[in-house]
Amino acid sequence: MKTRKAKKNLKKTEILGLEFKKIEKARKLSDGITANVQKYINLHTTTTIERATLRLLGADGADKNGVPVPNIIVDKMKDKISEGVSKYYLNALVKSGKTPGELNNEIANGLDISKMELGDESKIKSKAKEMVEALDKRLSENVKFRNQKIKEYSSNEKKPWIYVIVATGNIYEDVKQAQAAAMEGADIIAVIRTTAQSLLDYVPYGATTEGFGGTYATQENFRIMRKALDEVGDKLKRYIRLVNYCSGLCMPEIAAMGAMERLDMMLNDSMYGILFRDINMYRTFTDQFFSRMINASVEIIINTGEDNYLTTSDAVEKAHTVLTSQFINESFAKRAGMKEDLIGLGHAFEMNPDIKNGFLLEFSQALMAREIFPLHPLKYMPPTKFMTGDIFKGYAMNTMFNFVTKATNQTIQLLGMLTEAIHTPYLQDRFLAIENAKYVHNNIADFLGEVSFKKDGIIVKRAKQVLDESVKMLEEVNKIGLFDAIEKGMFADVKRPKDGGKGFEGVFEKSEDYFNPIEDYLKNKLKIR
Amino acid sequence: MNLVKPYGDTLNDGAMQISFTLPVPFGGKAKECAKLYLEKLGFKKADIVHMAELSESFSFFVAYVKTDVSIDYDSVEFTPAIDKAMSMDEVNAFIKEKIKRKVVVVGAATGFDAHTVGIDAIMNMKGYNHHFGLERYPMIEAMNMGAQVPNEKLIETAKKINADAILISQIVTQKDSHIKNLTNFIELIEAEKLRDKFVLIVGGPRINNKLALELGFDAGFGPGTYAEDVATFIVKKLYEKKVK
């Protein structure tokens, strides 16, 4: 990625002339906002954090009713979650002398490890060390493999990365469509999950061939798709990135599975679950931190979900809420050890196409994001809200979107489908979308270097206005606190009570002797605190 | 009798454009296959004007075809849910004058459907594309329950708030999940003997009035529907029930 980092003597951004002083102020305010939430996060754990920890230590599989082993373990230890559940799993490994696979089988068949008396602490700790070292080896190899492939094929890499979705509801059918999309030119494949998986408080086990609007995210499905993309990638001499959804009630577990199976990106937002899935805010904030540490440790790029704001709010009036959320997401991500090049902040091309000069406003917003977040792999999302059954107009709108994406140097581009609002994409819809994007990306390749913008023109003025509004909003949120701001409906026009939503019962205060070797490992690796 | 055929640039030329994919490798044989297939469908003249390779085993075609088939326009039966929508002000005036109390409407995207965009467009204060939603209507009390609401819960809520009308949004239609869900809703409400207590309306990109009536709803609305269309149907239906 080109870096356009501010030189010390520059007071304003290069193209739009946004004041660095204001941008810095916004960052400081955001850090103040997240600092208060982080205090809460540091004192708590959740059922899914404990399950993610178990997974990373080897717990896997499911019983005959499909209940995953990590859930079986945690469900029997509700009274012990405060002290950390992994201790009991490690203890069972020590005492039984079994491998994780053998132990998992026994747990699936009814062994209750919470009933096994805790043995010598030093033995548990040395078992933890052994398991963490094995995990570290596996994860490091994944990172090494990915980086080596990216390097090997770097001459074939183009930006923006073309991101498309497969959503057949059957992992084996998804594989065919994903491979076809890669051959057509897609760089990134997202496998849509079944509707409502975000509300399941467990991650299903094994390969799946059913679901609505997508199939389940499972570790086996990750593995199947990873293999398929590696195969087609080697053929094409391009590294094809794989994405899934690290959101909902099992954020940290999805992150754990993605880390082990070498996913490359995760949709992972600090507030999305609260606002759009009515998941409890304390649960979400605590989970996002742990999941982001995992993602950071294996260099998985996160994609934040600001595009969603614009489906419930007006894209012109509420543009500043997107920027505000980007600042907050960035701050949370940094607290979880993420570097800028892993923080894929989201935004979208969602203004009503009937607005006069709407294109200029979209251009302004996209360029503003690029200038404020120069090192971030920005994720730009296509029109959806104003897509109708008119596929011809839709195709034209997507062309305009492609123009803004390339001209403002976005990194990750989720392509718009001409049949958005009709059905999940047909093979040919995806092909037409990729053809359109490739045409525009090439045809205007060096556009931005050729133009400058009027100082008092629509584009420059609009960006300044949105930044000003965002700073104002951050000041307000900073004053009342993020929990209250969400309760008041300041984001996405959605109000969520603090103790409302799903999953609150799964949040636990950590006891003084809380034990979690994975958390220690991640914090140590990422140099947190 | 008024026989009609597609119009390209001359009356009755029967010209149509078609695009589609076949699971065959790209090449001359694929093109011939696509042409023959269109002829097999009954088209008289099929020109494959463009083809592209989607992957090793899939090819995409754009075709122009001509047809001899015509249809009698006069014999087409069609009943829209409403003839003409009243404006928001007209709806309010109608309620004040003829119903003489506030109208209560509850809505949700039900079943597994996680998309609120449809129900929000109709119900939320802001509405969609400069058409205010039902929450904005002074004479309507609108309650939007959001997405992924179980049918049972929607019915329970409708009973509790004594709703006049229930709106259901269905965006996800993969594998006909919407049909199953809507059928389940009607079965539940009939089992409780509440079918006639409410005006039942369904909306979504793949919904039309005919389908809704077949499934047992009072009306169905497809793409391009605004709150005033739905409101017009509700108040007229309520008035009709009242007069009866």
Image (cartoon, rainbow, N blue to C red):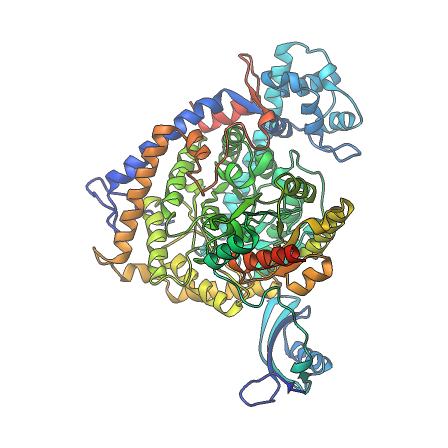
> In this view of the protein, which residue sits in the foreground, A484 or B189?
B189
Above or below, A132 relative to A248? above
Residue drawn where x is 50% and y is 34% of the image: A496
Q: Is residue B130 left or right of residue B170?
A: left
Residue drawn where x is 69% and y is 38% of the image: A204
Residue furthest left in the image:
A9
Above or below, A261 relative to A515? below
Q: Position of residue A448 (x, y in %)?
A: 31, 59
Q: Position of residue A178 (x, y in %)?
A: 61, 56
| Quadrant in which the C terminus of chain A is drawn | top left
User: Residue B82's image quarter?
Assistant: bottom right
Q: Position of residue A397 (x, y in %)?
A: 45, 64
Task: Give the total of numbered labels.
Answer: 0
Residue furthest top in the image:
A120
Residue A410 seen in this snapshot = yes
> In this view of the protein, which residue sits in the foreground, A99 or A50?
A50
Above or below, B25 relative to B95? below
Residue A32 seen in this snapshot = no
> In this view of the protein, which residue sits in the foreground, B13 or A330?
B13
Q: Is residue A478 left or right of residue B148?
A: left
Q: Is residue A324 left or right of residue B146?
A: left
Q: Position of residue A41 (x, y in %)?
A: 48, 24
> In this view of the protein, which residue sits in the foreground, B46 or A357?
A357
